[in-house]
Image (tube, rainbow, N blue to C red):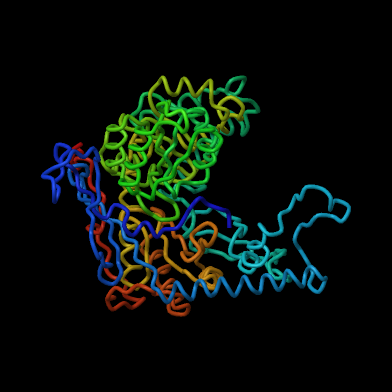
Amino acid sequence: MPPSMTKSSANKLTNGDVFHRTSNGKTSSRRNGFVKNHCLFQQPQQKNRRPSENNHVVSRTTNASLYNKAFVEQFEETPLLVAVLTYMGYGILTIFGYLRDFLRHWGMEKCHVAREREEQKDFVPLYQDFENFYTRNLYMRIRDNWNRPICSVPGAKMDLLERASKDYNWTFQHTGKLVKDVINMGSYNYLGFAENTGRCADAATESTHHYGVGVGSTRYEMGNLDIHEELEQLVARFLGVESSMAFGMGFATNSMNIPALAGKGCLILSDELNHASLVLGARLSGSIIRVFKHNNMVSLEKLLRDAIVHGQPRTRRPWKKILILVEGIYSMEGSIVRLPEVIALKKRYKAFLYLDEAHSIGALGPRGGGVVDYFALDPKDVDIMMGTFTKSFGAAGGYIGGKRELIDYLRSHSHSAIYATSMSPPVSQQIITSMKIIMGEDGTTLGVVRLRQLSENTTYFRRKLREMGFIIYGNDDSPVVPMMLYMPAKIGAFGREMLKRNIGTVVVGFPATPIIESRARFCVSAAHTRDILDTALEAISEVGYILQLKYSRHQRRPHLPSSLGSWSSEESLLQEPSHIKPSVM
């Protein structure tokens, strides 16, 4: 499992539960009448606070003036017995892991792990045995759930190449057989543009005939094509910003551009659940990094106030720049950033805001414009708008949008812009065509239909999983749907049982998640039909009974797999653009 910068989610239980906005900077005091308070957001102190009924935590906001719609996120508390059994499971696996390492050391068990050669024993170790303990003894047990070869378009359904292992997942052999028509519940194909037929595929094919596949140069040399210029102008228009810049790799868009925006003497405030690309970019910048609790505006404001009051360490000089890093949709939690409150804080404390919309662009908002569109905010309030083309657009690469001065600066200072090879022309054309469909510039309503279908599918899928009794994390409007598994043995078992029923899923565990919060992560797509979702839900419910995954303490509605309920467009939370009320700031 690739590591993620996700940390413990225990803080989510109180993050932003209640925020009270001060009136004229004054708050009542029990002793001294009133006192001056410079906090924009503050949490009331509650004595003997008890968990809500059924340990179900619903995160709401009372800053109604900052939101144009209800903002509700649910993170049900881990049942105590489940948490204890999960720790016990990892403890037992660790004990047996040390036992097997002992047997390997004395040659009683064959060792498949890369190790130092005997003649290199005096060298600095290249392989850290202790750091690879988890990979050797825990990950290998369930490794068959990842890296499955796909031999078709990863659309709503896909074909998998069957493989088998004779040495307990250390190596795999292809059997030559295909597992056909596997329902794809794991790809980031939010709007269904991962397809080999239709307008996008035809346009990409025509672009290949005209430009070829590769450019063979950077854009600063001989790799700047007219199609790249067209793409950047279209992205800027789609985002509602002055200018934009496209990059060939989404991860590098963060990791290589943040160092160009911040450096020594700057402060970066990063959400604790930010993606590894944001964390790597912050580290490479050489800036001081401070982490605030996930989506917790009280924690963020405290860091902002402390930064302004105390300044830089030792010298106490003012920070050259304060940069706030957040994501639109957090891919492991399914939560949506509290963008109106973040913008209010960044304006008050004169900070800059870097918004990563990798998962939200195209997947949120009545026009598919991401969290800015979702909250009906002004794009000018976000200083740096970043996103990727790998999810909703069915392509590859990333972008940064903002003021023209910002983009001109990045063109000459970003390592990703100066040294990276230009984006492939067919990929550029795929993005252009899909983006025009979303914007309605292709002369059809296909974009609106897909946006509405994604919203309806998300609402339907999340509601049905909760009714079945599963613990589901995140925002009701998020197409990323984490379903909690908890115990390590159930990670592999769930993935295997679902594949037996022709459902392809993504399962995630430690260290990509907190140790007691292993989960299955579903990604809903506009390409999913009602029948596909019902088939997947029936299989999930069946496997849930077998593995005893229905941990929720909510009172469940009677549910039968064959009667998943009626489908209604009223289930969609997507509003028409004309009905969106402007945000009150």
Q: Is residue 357 above or below residue 525?
A: above
Taking depth in this image into account, of 353 and 494 the one nearest to the observer is 353
Taking depth in this image into account, of 353 and 155 the one nearest to the observer is 353
Residue 433 falls in image quadrant = top left
Q: Is residue 162 above or below residue 222?
A: below
For the point 78% across and 66% down, the residue is 111
Q: How many badges with numbers are in the image?
A: 0
Instruction: Say whether residue 361 is left or right of residue 223.
Output: left
Q: Can you name the residue that lies furthest to the right here?
A: 119
Is residue 397 in sight in this rendering? no
Task: Please state the horizontal and vertical placement of residue 67, each as a whole percent of the image.
Answer: 22, 44
Taking depth in this image into account, of 105 and 25 the one nearest to the observer is 25
For the point 84% across and 55% down, the residue is 117
Which quadrant is home to the N terminus? Answer: bottom right
Q: Can you name the residue that lies furthest to the front here?
A: 31
For the point 54% across and 26% down, the residue is 414
Instruction: Say whether residue 577 is left or right of residue 474.
Output: left
Taking depth in this image into account, of 404 and 156 the one nearest to the observer is 404
Which quadrant is home to the C terminus? Answer: top left
Task: Please state the horizontal and vertical placement of residue 33, each as a whole percent of the image.
Answer: 10, 45
Task: Please state the horizontal and vertical placement of residue 345, each as a whole percent of the image.
Answer: 29, 37
Is residue 318 in sight in this rendering? yes
Instruction: Say whether residue 477 is left or right of residue 84.
Output: left
Task: Please state the horizontal and vertical placement of residue 427, each as a whole percent of the image.
Answer: 53, 37
